[in-house]
Image (cartoon, rainbow, N blue to C red):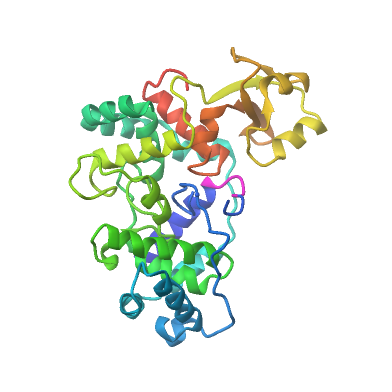
């Protein structure tokens, strides 16, 4: 019961982070988001109606067998390796129950208390102080603020305290073949995970993470791990679970690859008189579609200096019931948003980083 309670709590936290619906795989995820989550368009989705692996076992499931055939044909993994893996994994029905729970987002005035409040900043100060030398070195090399790196680790896993203790193999196998709503994504991530384990020369059953398969202090999904995790200390392992240098470099690398610009702002507060046009802009999917100058012409007034040529997304946060503050998110806002597709998440990361002394992100 205790394990189930922990999983439920994790699910509710994840649901809270996702204030905005994530777009279809186009990388955070679930999870890395988390990191950007791509599903290959040419990859088949094995989803015929068949008995659940919970009932018949994974290797007796028709979709699993098709997955094995497909992966073995790609010659990254042998048929024997795949069959041995599916003989060893355990179906986790409680994960399906968590994923099926309706998620309702908390308003910003509640969300920020647990995600970027004083306790989170205090924890960040302690984590940064204990690892300042290596984090500062990595921040300088990648051009990403040290405080931002620390903030992401803080909001993802409370500075490594809540990395998740579920076998990633069990979580991904269960979701890949018994959760059709997102089965296509999880089949892709399962394939990435098995290749990742082989690359890392580790037993796939030895990895632990969240109920959705996100791993380590920064909660990378397997595809994100393979693309962006860094072996910073050159010891032959990309250890995002316990090695702070690898963790910090992996987060910094992710930010750099996804467009972080050194010295750039993330968020600027604005004033406006809300109208149908501006509300429609706020309700659009998050993207850098408009310039600041174009938003000004719609009636948006930045309250801090920002160039008209900068691209921006207009958004709002509920500071008390029915009362909103308005902001524009700039290029670096969008870089962090690709890690987790929630405007509240990105703002919380910014607030933690500023609380740690980032100097007005």
Q: Main secondary structure of the magenta part?
A: loop
Span shown in magenta: 17-22
Q: Residue 10, image x and y in percent?
A: 43, 55
Q: Is residue 20 magenta?
A: yes
Q: Residue 316, image x and y in percent?
A: 65, 32
Residue 190 visible in the current orientation = yes
Q: Residue 234, image x and y in percent?
A: 20, 42
Q: Residue at x 69, y 28 (%)?
A: 290
Q: Is residue 16 magenta?
A: no
User: In the image, is residue 26 above or below residue 151?
Assistant: below
* Residue 352, picture quadrant: top left
User: In the image, is residue 180 above or below residue 36?
Assistant: below
* Residue 138, picture quadrant: top left
Residue 119 visible in the current orientation = no
- Judging depth in this view, the residue of 98 and 285 nearest the camera is 285
Q: Residue at x 47, y 83 (%)?
A: 61
- Classify the position of the N terminus by image quarter: bottom left
Q: Residue at x 76, y 37 (%)?
A: 280
User: In the image, is residue 72 above or below residue 336?
Assistant: below
- Judging depth in this view, the residue of 89 and 228 nearest the camera is 228
User: In the image, is residue 223 above or below residue 244?
Assistant: below
Q: Is residue 81 left or right of residue 227?
A: left
């Amino acid at each position: 019961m205790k394990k189930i309670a922990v999983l439920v709590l994790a699910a509710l936290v994840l649901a809270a982070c996702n204030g905005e619906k994530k777009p279809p795989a186009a990388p955070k995820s679930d999870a890395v988001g988390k990191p950007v989550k791509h599903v290959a368009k040419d990859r088949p989705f094995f989803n015929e109606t068949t008995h659940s692996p919970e009932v018949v076992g994974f290797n007796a499931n028709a979709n699993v067998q098709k997955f094995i055939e497909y992966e073995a044909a790609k010659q990254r993994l042998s048929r024997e390796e795949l069959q041995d893996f599916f003989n060893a994994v355990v179906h986790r029905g409680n994960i399906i129950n968590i994923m099926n729970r309706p998620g309702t987002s908390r308003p910003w005035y509640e969300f920020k208390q647990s995600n970027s409040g004083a306790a989170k900043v205090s924890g960040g100060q302690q984590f940064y102080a204990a690892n300042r030398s290596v984090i500062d070195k990595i921040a300088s090399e990648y051009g990403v603020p040290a405080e931002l790196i620390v903030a992401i680790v803080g909001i993802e896993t409370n500075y490594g305290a809540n990395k998740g203790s579920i076998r990633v193999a069990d979580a991904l196998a269960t979701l890949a073949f018994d959760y059709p709503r997102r089965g296509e994504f999880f089949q892709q991530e399962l394939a990435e995970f098995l290749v990742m384990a082989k690359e890392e020369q580790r037993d796939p059953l030895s990895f632990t993470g969240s109920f959705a398969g996100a791993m380590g202090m920064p909660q990378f999904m397997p595809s994100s791990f393979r693309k962006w995790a860094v072996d910073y200390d050159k010891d032959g392992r990309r250890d995002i679970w316990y090695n702070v240098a690898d963790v910090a470099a992996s987060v910094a690398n992710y930010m750099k690859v996804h467009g972080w610009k050194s010295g750039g702002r993330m968020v600027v507060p604005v004033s406006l008189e809300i109208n149908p046009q501006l509300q429609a802009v706020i309700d659009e999917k998050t993207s850098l579609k408009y310039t600041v100058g174009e938003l000004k012409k719609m009636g948006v007034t930045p309250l801090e200096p920002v160039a008209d040529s900068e691209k921006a997304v207009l958004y709002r946060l509920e500071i008390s019931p029915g009362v909103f503050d308005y902001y524009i998110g700039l290029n670096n806002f969008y870089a962090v948003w690709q890690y987790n597709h929630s405007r509240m998440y990105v703002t919380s990361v910014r607030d933690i980083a500023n609380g740690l002394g980032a100097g007005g992100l």
